[in-house]
């Protein structure tokens, strides 16, 4: 787990980011990679999504208070691929 101290004025909280690596089936080219990455980043609370075509994996960094792992998986599935943990 990574801790980020937000330095925005008036904001004193610390955002706790959670990491997960999802298995993603169905990707065959860089276009698929881009689609999956955009699907993950479309979730509010996702700060980073690295998708690896060779390994069929997606590394996601997110704020678990804003988005759940299930929602991340669903967003990939809704874009036409198959994500699992
Ligand atoms: Cu493709």
Image (cartoon, rainbow, N blue to C red):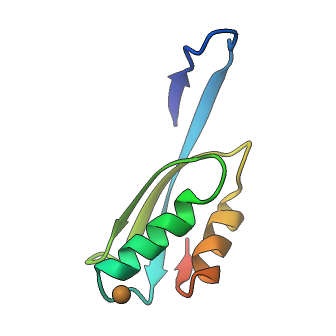
**Would you place residue 29 above or below residue 21 in this image?**
below
**Would you place residue 1 above or below residue 21 in this image?**
above
- Residue 81: x and y in percent read 52, 85
Is 70 positioned to the left or the right of 16 in the image? right
- Residue 66: x and y in percent read 73, 46
Q: Could you say which is closer to the camera, residue 41 or residue 60?
A: 41
Query: Image quarter for residue 52?
Result: bottom left
The quadrant of the rendering that contains the C terminus is bottom right
Ligand 1: give its quadrant: bottom left
Is 53 positioned to the left or the right of 34 in the image? left
Is 15 positioned to the left or the right of 3 in the image? right
Q: Could you say which is closer to the camera, residue 82 or residue 38?
A: 38
Residue extending farthest to the left is 54
Is 76 positioned to the left or the right of 51 in the image? right
Q: What residue is rendered at 70% in x and 65% in y?
A: 71
Q: What residue is rendered at 56% in x and 87% in y?
A: 80
Count of numbered labels shown in the rendering:
0
Query: Image quarter for residue 6?
Result: top right
Query: Image quarter for residue 7?
Result: top right
- Residue 10: x and y in percent read 70, 9
**Would you place residue 16 above or below residue 64 in this image?**
above
Q: What residue is rendered at 56% in x and 76% in y?
A: 84
């Amino acid at each position: 787990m990574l801790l980020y101290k937000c330095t925005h004025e008036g904001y004193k909280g610390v955002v706790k980011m959670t990491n997960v690596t999802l298995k993603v089936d169905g990707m065959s080219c860089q276009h698929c990679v881009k689609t999956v990455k955009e699907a993950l980043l479309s979730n509010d609370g996702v700060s980073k999504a690295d998708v690896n075509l060779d390994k069929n994996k997606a590394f996601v960094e997110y704020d678990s208070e804003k988005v759940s792992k299930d929602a991340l998986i669903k967003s990939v599935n809704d874009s036409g691929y198959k994500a699992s943990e």
